[in-house]
């Protein structure tokens, strides 16, 4: 467990093994070039839920933006 407030956005991005199934789905759709609105429609989830999944993805993968999620 990392200390409270510690950032994983340093160094090399992680492999993504710690993502939930839904977070992985969102990441794959971002990689396919879908917008947040498109993702909400495809997965029938709210825009806020997409934003939350993306924020978790960035934290868990140690990246700073959705472009890095896509790669």
Image (cartoon, grey):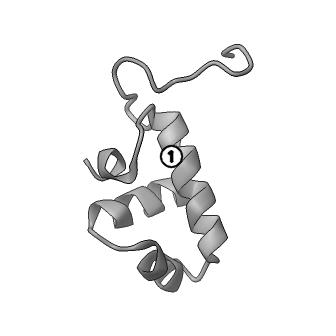
Residue 17 visible in image: no
Residue 17 is left or right of residue 3, and the answer is left
Query: SS of the residue at dot 1?
Result: helix
Please give the name of the residue rendered at 34% of the width and 73% of the height, measured from the top-left corner.
Answer: 34
Residue 56 is left or right of residue 37, and the answer is right
Please give the name of the residue rendered at 31% of the width and 44% of the height, measured from the top-left corner.
Answer: 68
Instruction: Report the front residue among 21 and 48.
Output: 48
Measuring from the top left, give residue 33's x and y in whole percent. Answer: 27, 69
Question: Is disc 1 surrounded by few (<14), some (14 to 19) or many (20+) residues within 10 Å?
Answer: many
Q: Is residue 20 above or below residue 4?
A: below
Q: Is residue 40 above or below residue 23?
A: below
Tally the numbered discs: 1
Residue 56 visible in image: yes
Instruction: Report the front residue among 15 and 49.
Output: 49
Measuring from the top left, give residue 48's x and y in whole percent. Answer: 65, 69
Please give the name of the residue rendered at 63% of the width and 18% of the height, measured from the top-left corner.
Answer: 6
Which image quarter holds the N terminus?
A: top right
Measuring from the top left, give residue 29's x and y in whole percent. Answer: 36, 67
Q: Is residue 52 above or below residue 42?
A: above
Please give the name of the residue rendered at 66% of the width and 15% of the height, measured from the top-left corner.
Answer: 2
**Which residue does the numbered mark 1 point to in the structure image?**
57
Measuring from the top left, give residue 41's x and y in whole percent. Answer: 50, 86
Residue 46 is left or right of residue 11, and the answer is right
Toward which corner of the image does residue 32 lie, by quadrant?
Answer: bottom left
């Amino acid at each position: 467990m990392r200390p409270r407030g510690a950032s994983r956005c340093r160094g090399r991005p992680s492999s993504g093994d710690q993502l939930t199934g839904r977070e992985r789905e969102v990441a794959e759709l971002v990689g396919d070039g879908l917008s947040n609105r498109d993702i909400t429609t495809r997965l029938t989830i709210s825009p806020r839920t997409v934003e939350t999944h993306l924020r978790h993805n960035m934290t868990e993968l140690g990246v700073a933006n959705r472009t890095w999620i896509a790669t």
